[in-house]
Image (tube, grey):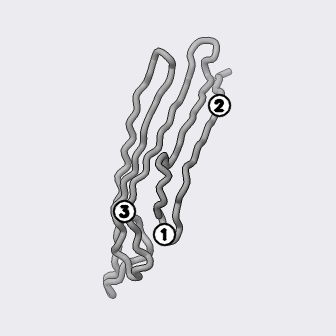
Amino acid sequence: MNGTDRDTGDYVGILSPARLDVNTGFKLKAIDTRLGVRGQFAAKHDKVNDPAEARDAYETFDIYAAWTPAGALEGLRVDVGVDNLFDRNFERVFAGVSEPGRNVKALISWTDSF
């Protein structure tokens, strides 16, 4: 997103670059599992008043899996994922605030009704 001051023509604040988020996955019914991949593609952010606020284009990829068994374990859900799979160093929000590093995560939950 870009914004300009009508009076001065200056860019307004530190806004976000154009981004495309893609999420695709498939379900493996035989093993009660869903697998997926997310990608985020951001354009270069160069419509800034101060060149130090410019940010390069970037792309990141995440992978994830969710297991939701049927039968005796129905209600259980196990999620695992890796964000920033290729360990890209990118600046999503502000110049100088980089987000390097891979994030590995897991979640176990149980849902039941009574």
In the shown orientation, is residue 99 left or right of residue 42? right
The answer to whether 25 is drawn above or below residue 41 in the figure is: above
Q: CA distance from mark 2 to mark 3?
A: 36 Å
Question: Is the C-beta separation of discs 2 and 1 under 8 Å?
Answer: no
Where does the image place residue 69, in percent across and percent down from the top left?
57, 19
Label at residue 57:
3
Secondary element at image label 3? loop
| Mark 3 or mark 1, whichever is nearer to me | 3
Disc 2: which residue: 109
Which residue sits furthest top? 71
Where does the image place residue 66, in percent across and percent down from the top left?
53, 30
**Looking at the picture, which amino acid does disc 2 mark?**
Ser
Secondary element at image label 1? loop
Where does the image place residue 6, in percent across and percent down from the top left?
31, 82
Question: Is the C-beta separation of discs 3 and 1 under 8 Å?
Answer: no
The quadrant where residue 58 appears:
bottom left
Q: CA distance from mark 2 to mark 1?
A: 34 Å
Residue at 62% in and 24% down: 76
Quarter the C terminus occupies: top right
Label at residue 94:
1
Q: Nearer the viewer, residue 79 or 82?
A: 82
Q: CA distance from mark 3 to mark 1?
A: 13 Å
The answer to whether 18 is drawn above or below residue 7 in the figure is: above
Residue at 65% in and 32% down: 108
In the shown orientation, is residue 8 left or right of residue 34? left
Where does the image place residue 96, in percent across and percent down from the top left?
51, 71
The quadrant where residue 67 appears:
top right
